[in-house]
């Protein structure tokens, strides 16, 4: 009887250990996905601000149908910094073309790590549309 109880205790400890490991993995995956979603939301907001800047006349502080004068301070988030609790944002490309050749690329680097590097999302902003991709 003693060996059977010992075996059941060991089996119970193994099952609990596996459940804890799966729970930690699920929590980590959820945090990574939440950070990616938050970055995507912020980048959609910034893309909208870029398009507003593009359409605004230069006399009113806009781009006058160009992204060439676009700076991070022109489209900052509510904190007036190119970062918030979700991550850091940077304009990696601001094309000087007009019309459909005009382009802005904004990269958001998150606070959560995925495979040893921070999650990252990139958005390509055109005057009439935007396109987003997860980098990491």
Image: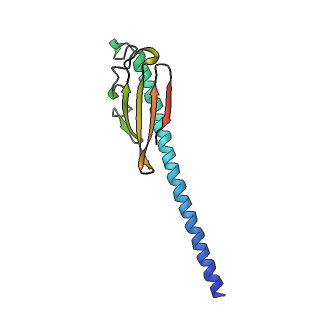
Q: Is 30 on the left-hand or right-hand side of 88?
A: right
Q: Identify which residue, 104 or 12, lies in the foreground.
A: 104
Way the structure is coloured: rainbow
Q: Is 60 on the left-hand or right-hand side of 35?
A: left
* Rendered residue at 43%/20% (across/down): 52
Percent x, y of residue 35:
47, 43
Percent x, y of residue 94:
37, 24
Compared to residue 123, the image places residue 128 above or below, namely: above
- Residue 129 appears anywhere in the view: yes
Dividing the picture into quadrants, the one containing residue 1 is bottom right
Q: Identify which residue, 14 or 82, lies in the foreground.
A: 14
* Count of marks overlaid on the render: 0
Percent x, y of residue 65:
40, 14
Percent x, y of residue 97:
39, 17
* Rendered residue at 43%/29% (across/down): 46
* Rendered residue at 63%/87% (across/down): 2
- Residue 75 appears anywhere in the view: no
């Amino acid at each position: 009887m003693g060996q059977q109880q010992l075996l059941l205790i060991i089996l119970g400890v193994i099952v609990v250990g596996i459940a804890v490991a799966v729970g930690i993995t699920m929590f980590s995956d959820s945090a990574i996905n939440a950070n990616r979603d938050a970055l995507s939301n912020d980048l959609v907001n910034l893309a909208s601000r870029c398009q507003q800047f593009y359409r605004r006349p230069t006399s009113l502080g806009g781009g006058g149908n160009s992204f060439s004068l676009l700076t991070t301070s022109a489209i900052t988030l509510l904190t007036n910094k190119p970062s918030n609790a979700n991550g850091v944002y940077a304009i990696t490309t601001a094309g000087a073309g007009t019309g459909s050749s005009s382009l802005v690329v904004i990269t958001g680097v998150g606070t959560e790590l995925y495979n040893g590097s921070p999650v990252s999302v990139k958005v390509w902003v055109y005057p009439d549309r935007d396109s987003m991709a997860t980098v990491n």
